Amino acid sequence: MSSRPSEKLWRSSSFRITVLYLGLSWLTLAIVMLFMYQHVRSQLWQGIHAQLDQDVVRIERFHQRQPLDPDRPLPVYNSEQGSERLWILEVKRRNGDHKIYTGAKPRTFSIARPPGFGRDSEAMLMEEGGHLFITRRISLPPNLTARIGRNVDYLYALDAALRGAIISGLLLTLLLSLAGAILLGRRTVRRLNDINRLCADIVAGHMDKRVPVETGRDDYDRLALSINLMLDRIQQLMHSIQQVSDNIAHDLKTPLARLRARLELIRQDQDGEVMDEVMAEADRMMVMFNALLRIGRLEAGSAQLKRDHIDMLALVNDLAELYEPLFEDKGIRFQVVGQGLPTQGDPDLWFQALGNLLDNALKYTPEGGEVSIRLQSSSGQTIEVIDRGPGIAPEQREQVFERFFRAEAHRQTEGFGLGLSLVRAVAHIHRAELSLHDAKPGLRVRIQLPSVG
C-alpha cells in the first residue's frame, strides 16, 4: 500500500465527518459574525443620524442668535473639538445664490444615501480636504438654506477595522479548525491502522500480538481492550484444541509404535503374511497422525520455519528424479517446464507439499495420461501442477482443503484426505496463494509465490 498519508487521511470517514462538522460550524459562525457586523454598523450610523437631528436644533438656535448671511463672512460654527466637529458647509438663498464656507465639494457615490438613512432623508456624503462628512440640508428663515455636516472619518476607519477583525478571526478559526481536524484525523487513522496491522498479524498466525492501549479511557482504548480480551480467549481456546489434538495424536501414536514393534518380533518367528498387512496398516496410521501433527503445527504457526533462499527449479528437478520412475511404471508422461524461480522459505516443507501434489496426480491420472510441473514468472512467480485425471468439481474445490474430506468419486482410491490440507498449510505459512482450476480435462493446481525482497 503506497498511498500517500494525505490520501489515507482523506479516505478516513471520521476525518471527513470532522471536516464536514467543522465546515458547518465555521459557516454558521461566519453568518452570525456577518449579522453582528451589519447590526453594529447600522447602530453606529443611526447614532450619527440622531446627532444630526440634535445638530439641526443647535443651528436653528445659533441662527436665531446670530443670523447666517451668505453676503458677509461668518465664523465657522463648531459644537465640539476634535474629529467629530459640526461644520456649516454651505449657506444659500432659496433663489440659488450660495456661499461655500469651507470649500466642500459633493462626492459621487454608488449608493445615494449613507448607511442607516432613509431615501427621503436630506442626508448625503461629501468630501472636503480628504475628509468625509455626513451632511444634512436645513431651511432657515426668512429665505435661506444651509447644509451642516459631521466628520465621519473615524466611523469609516472603525468600519474597516471591524471588517478586518472579522475576516482575520474567521480565517484564524478556519485554520485552527483544519489543524484540529487533521490532528484528530491522523490520530484516528493511526489507531485504526494499529488494529488493521494486528488483524494482518493474526491472519499470518501471530496469535500473541495485541492492540496497543494508550490511556484506557477513550473509545478506541475501550475497543482495543475488548479486542485484546477476545484474542486472549480465542488463543486459549485454540491452545486447548491444539493440546487436545496433540494429546490424541500422541496417545494413539505411542501404542501404535509399540504394536508395530511387537509385530516385528512376532514376524521374526513366524511366516506372517497377515503380520505384514497389520504392520502396513500400522504404518499408514502413523503416517496419518504425523501428517495431522504437522498440519496442526503449521496452521497454528508453532512450526519452526526456515527462511532459506530456494531455487524452485532445482527443488522441482529433485522431485522429478524421485517421481519419474513411478510415472513411467504407470505409463504416464511426466515433464518439468519453466525456469528458475528464486524465493525464500523452508525447502523441506515445499518439497513435501509439491510431493503431495505429485502423489495426487499419480493416483488420479490414468495410464497414458500426462502430468507436468510448470514454473513461470511472466505474470508473477507461479508453480502449476497439471494432471489429466478426473479433476475436481467447482463446488468441491474449497471442501477438498478440509482434513479427511474425500469426494465420492475418489473414495475407492487409497489415501487419507490430508494431502491438500498440508499443501494449503505450507502455502499459507509462506504467504503464497493456492488455487484450483479446471485443466480441461484434469486439474490445475496453481501456487502464486510471494515476491522476493
Image (tube, rainbow, N blue to C red):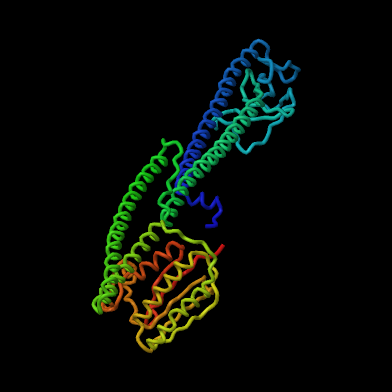
Q: Quadrant of the C terminus?
A: bottom right
Q: Position of residue 304 (x, y in %)?
A: 45, 58
Q: Position of residue 192 (x, y in %)?
A: 45, 47
Closest to the observer: 36 or 152?
36
Q: Please, which residue is most extreme toward the top here?
A: 65
Write the residue at 41% across / 49% down: 208
Q: Position of residue 53 (x, y in %)?
A: 57, 20
Write the residue at 40% across / 70% down: 435
Identify whether 349 is placed above or below 182: below
Q: Please, which residue is most extreme toward the right here?
A: 73
Q: Position of residue 171 (x, y in %)?
A: 58, 38
Name the side, left or right, on which 375 lies relative to 281: right
Q: Based on the displayed image, in which of its 4 quarters is residue 360 positioned?
A: bottom left
Identify whether 131 is placed above or below 293: above
Closest to the observer: 206 or 145?
206
Write the residue at 55% across / 36% down: 173
Q: Based on the displayed image, in which of its 4 quarters is residue 219 positioned?
A: top left
Q: Please, which residue is most extreme toward the left here?
A: 274
Name the side, left or right, on which 166 lies relative to 14: right
